[in-house]
Image: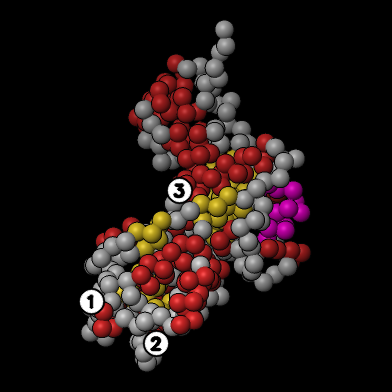
Amino acid sequence: MRIEKVTLADVAREAGVSAATVSRLMRGGARVTGATRERILQAAHRLDFDLEARKTSRIIAFMLSNRGVLHPFHSSVLMGAEAYCAEHDYGLLFLPLEYSLTLARDRLSLPEILLRKTVVTGVIVAGTNSRGMLDLLTHHEIPWIVLGNNVVGEWPHEKPQSIFFDDIRGAYELTSYLLSLGHRHIGFVGNLSLPWYFRRFQGYRRAMEEAGASLLSSDLRTLDGEEMGYLGTRLLLQQNPGPTAVFGADDPAARGVYRAARDQGMRVPEDLTVAGFNDTPDAAALHPPLTSVRVFTEELGRQGAELLFKQINQPEVPTASVVLPTQLVRRESCATLPPAQIQKPTVKARNRATKR
């Protein structure tokens, strides 16, 4: 008769808690209350699961580079990665790191704990990163998976050891939607020096060029999304003709677009259509609710952890990249342009559409 191995997930079900809670207890987490701890210990005893024996070096590091530790996007990615690790009897170590993106590999250094291979098994590399840091991890033979959207420089979808969400396609679909509403003067607000904004600009540019519409963008080198959206929109509105719609490169930028429009006495969407990206919880709470592009952040974390596990368990097999789709979420911040304001496509654009 085959005896099934008891897992951490089995203990969690028996105790009526999440696998992540059991994992935190095994790592000595202070967030586990006394009553919950006792339930887990009793469940483990009933299932003959030795919690002490499992306190080994089965730990994955979640390295968040050059971003705030409370960043909502990466916090959600971390939650997905933590859940997957817990389901597979691994702990997740959160490791914030600041370093210069311009330094070569030989001028960078890793946190000491990553060099202790008996402690950390592999690394999920999130935040904003350079090739130099990834080369350094490879040099030390540390298994890693990177969020490819945020690598500085060219980092195509085909790159191995990468997890992506298809923000280029998502931005293309959002811009195409705005075009379908009759808008031709569509502004884009983003900091194009940052890889995730530039990737979204690529999708915007492709849709605009296919439609024969002129690009109308504001590139501000600021890290504050709402400030970027506000200042960028105020600058765009000074142009003639100004935009009838603005694509904020993320939801905080779109919130800044709302502020700029209202300061100019404009109504959203009656006078200015607005859209964002990432579909954060704030998007639906804005007035009016914001049209945005949803990124499945927790699934991004789970898929990243799964890729890393494959690399750890089968180091001889090349680790292929994974690209997750995005989803356009239509809300009340976008409106059809009145027929009198719709600019007809040029002959060149009509010919291009016919060829497609």
- Whole-angstrom CA distance, mark 2 to mark 1, is 20 Å
Mark whose residue sits in front, 3 or 1: 1
- Which residue is depicted at the point 47% across and 28% down? 9
User: Does residue 69 lie above or below 261 as drawn?
Assistant: above
Q: Position of residue 340 (x, y in %)?
A: 26, 83
Tag 1: amino acid: Glu
Q: Crowdedness of circle 3 by 10 Å Cα count: few (<14), some, many (20+)?
A: many
- Along the polypeptide, which appears first: circle 2 or circle 1? 2
Tag 1 residue:
270
- Along the polypeptide, which appears first: circle 3 or circle 1? 1
The part of the chain drawn in magenta is: 133-144
Tag 2 residue:
235
Q: Crowdedness of circle 1 by 10 Å Cα count: few (<14), some, many (20+)?
A: some
Tag 3 residue:
298
- Whole-angstrom CA distance, mark 3 to mark 2, is 36 Å
SS state under label 2: helix
Q: Would residue 2 be found to the left or right of residue 73 on screen?
A: right
> In which image quadrant can residue 330 be found?
bottom left
